[in-house]
Amino acid sequence: MSDLKTWDYLRREAKDRLEAGGFVDGDQEAQWLVEEVSGMDSAELIASAKTFASVRATEQLDTLLARRLIGEPLQYVLGSWSFRGIDLMVDRRVLIPRPETETLVGLALIEAQRMGLQPEEVVVDLGTGSGAIAIGLAAQLFEVAIWATDVDSRALEVARANVAARGRMSAGIQIVQGSWFDALPHELSGRVRLVVSNPPYIAEDEIPELPPGVIDYEPFSAIVSGPTGSEHIETILLAAQDWLTDDGVVLIELDPRRAKKTHTYALSVGFAGAVIENDLTGQPRFLIARR
Ligand SMILES: C[S@@+](CC[C@H](N)C(=O)[O-])C[C@H]1O[C@@H](n2cnc3c(N)ncnc32)[C@H](O)[C@@H]1O
């Protein structure tokens, strides 16, 4: 019994260990880790501050801290992350959904409204990973047919779990495996009104510039496109010509260094108009290409 520690003690101990390990957000991370192992939210933890944690929870916290202290991303350690207010399961099979992609979904919803998207019309999330984009869209676009694709079967396991966890809200999402548009049934050719995608867009020689932890933990094939970084984006923009309706739109997240080049490419393969939108840090991050 004497080894038992209170939740408050465990939280402070975790904070100290994280800060000693150089984590500037040690206080916040300790809070989230303790919430995870206790199953309590912040208010419940305050009320239970002087309660003793079980040995099992204490050991589990120690395991999570050890993973975090060697540099594993917090999102994988926690096993879930919020995307547009929706809690998604994440692990090393999928890219951690980023704030930029939340903005991409916001832009797609504005576009859907501008287009007057109707129930049963077809929207596609290419390279769905955790399912973040498809689920973010489904939360607002009721009764639209959303197809979520990925080439990676392990990523699709996570997407399926996340879609299932949303219940009826994501009932309109179909998950299919294959490379970009090849995953879709042929009947959808010429019927897709909106494509939203965050494909891999890092060039091979840019890998050393990535923040620590990214290439060590996140799936390589979710991040790196190839020698130029534009390979996948160009494949999608070109193939989109066969799949979109006459007024169809593609929204793609991209590397700001290649925004201008991608804009030019979109016009060269047949889009009538294209604009680049900035992310929240003011970087040119998204292409909206309209037929
Ligand atoms: C940058 S991640 C985006 C994941 C998720 N959409 C998000 O925004 O968090 C790119 C995704 O594209 C998938 N991908 C890579 N190559 C692909 C291909 N040829 N066809 C379909 N998906 C592919 C990866 O498996 C990965 O899940």
Image: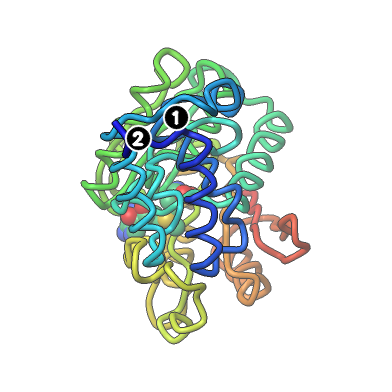
Other residues around mark 2 within 10 Å, as few (<14) / some (14–19) / many (≥20): some
What kind of element bears circle 1?
strand
Q: Residue at x 37, y 27 (%)?
A: 163
Q: Nearer the viewer, mark 2 or mark 1?
A: 2
Query: In the displayed image of the protein, which residue is found farthest to the right?
Result: 282
The colour scheme of the drawn protein is rainbow
What kind of element bears circle 2?
loop
Q: CA distance from mark 2 to mark 1?
A: 49 Å
> Where residue 201 is drawn, which disc sits there?
none
**200 or 241: which is nearer to us?**
200
Q: Does residue 242 appear anywhere in the picture?
A: no
Picture quarter containing residue 26?
A: bottom right
Which amino acid type is marked by label 1? Ile
**146 or 203: which is nearer to us?**
203
Answer left or right for 79 relative to 201.
left
Q: Looking at the rendering, in which quadrant would you find the N terminus?
A: top left
Q: Residue at x 28, y 34 (%)?
A: 55
Q: Residue at x 46, y 42 (%)?
A: 10
> Where residue 4 is drawn, which disc sits there?
2
Q: Quadrant of ligand 1?
A: bottom left
Q: Does residue 259 appear anywhere in the picture?
A: yes
Other residues around mark 1 within 10 Å, as few (<14) / some (14–19) / many (≥20): many
> Where residue 146 is drawn, which disc sits there?
1
Note whether 108 is above or below 168 in the view shown: below
> Residue 138, image x and y in percent?
51, 26
**243 or 169: which is nearer to us?**
169
> Residue 244, image x and y in percent?
50, 43
